[in-house]
Image (cartoon, helix red, strand yellow):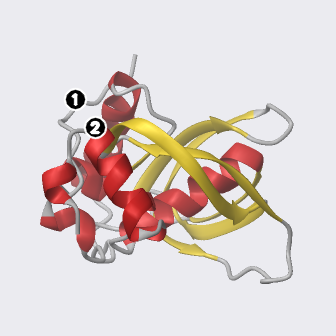
Amino acid sequence: MAKGRARSITLYGEPVLHRPCAEVTDFGPDLARLVDDMRASMKVADGVGLAANQIGVSLRVFVYDCPDADGERHAGHIVNPVLEPFSRRGATTKETEGCLSVPGPHTELRRASVATVTGVDVEGRPVSVTGSGYLARCLQHECDHLDGVVYVDLLSGRRRRKILTEAGLGDRAR
C-alpha cells in the first residue's frame, strides 16, 4: 500500500485544471509527501497516471504506473517534465483514452506511438522516460494536464460536450 494519503480528484471545469502549472523549485519533504499522496490517490482512483493539478496542486509533477506496448509495467514520477518534440511524420495511434478528472466515459484520440519525457525526480536528479503504447499515451496525457489541457479539450466541441455530459459534467463544458 502506498504510504501517502489519498486526496480527492479534481474534476473538469475547476480552474486549476485549465491553466499551466508552476515549475517545482523546492525539492524538500513537502514534494516527496506530494508524490506519495499522488501515488495513493492514483491507486485509490484506479488510475494509471495522475498530474498534481488533478488533486488541486498547481505544480509540474506527475506519477504513472502502466504498461508499455510490450506489456512491461513502468511506474514512477517526473518533476518538471518536458515532453520531447516528436516528428509530425512519426507513427501515431488512435486508441481509447479516459481521465480521472472526467470520470466514466472514454473516447478515441490520436497520439504519438512513442513519447519521451525528461525532467527530474523528487531529489532533483535527472530522469528520462521513453514509452511506447499505453505508456506513451500516459506520458503525453499527463504532460498535457500540466500545461492546462484535459484530453477532452483536444476533441471537437460536439464530442467534448458528449463526453462531459456522459460524465455528468455537461454544465462544465467550455
**Mark 2 packing: few (<14 Cα in 10 Å), some, or many (20+)?**
many
Camera-side residue of 68 and 169: 169
| Nearer to the camera, 147 or 95 | 95
Above-or-below relation of 114 to 84: above
- Is the Cβ of the residue at disc 1 closer than 8 Å to that at disc 2? yes
Marks 1 and 2 sit apart, C-alpha to C-alpha, by: 5 Å
Horizontally, is 110 left or right of 68 in the view? left
| Residue type beneath disc 1 | Arg
**SS class, disc 1:** loop
Q: In the figure, 172 relative to 58: above or below?
A: above
The image position of residue 66, as x and y in percent, is 62, 36
In the rendered image, residue 140, in percent from the top left (x then y), is placed at 58, 63
Q: Looking at the image, which residue is at 70% across and 67% down?
A: 116
Residue 2: image quadrant is top left
- Going by the image, does 51 lie left or right of 71? left
Marker count (numbered)? 2
**Residue placed at 80% from the left, 83% from the top?**
87
Q: Mark number for residue 5?
A: 1
**Where does label 2 land, which residue?**
37
Give the residue drawn at x 46%, y 47%: 63
Is residue 27 something that shows in the picture?
yes
Residue furthest front in the image: 158
Instruction: Give percent across and percent down for residue 1.
Output: 40, 16
- In the drawing, what numbered circle is on residue 122? none
Q: Amino acid at mark 2?
A: Asp
Residue farthest along the top direction in this orientation:
1
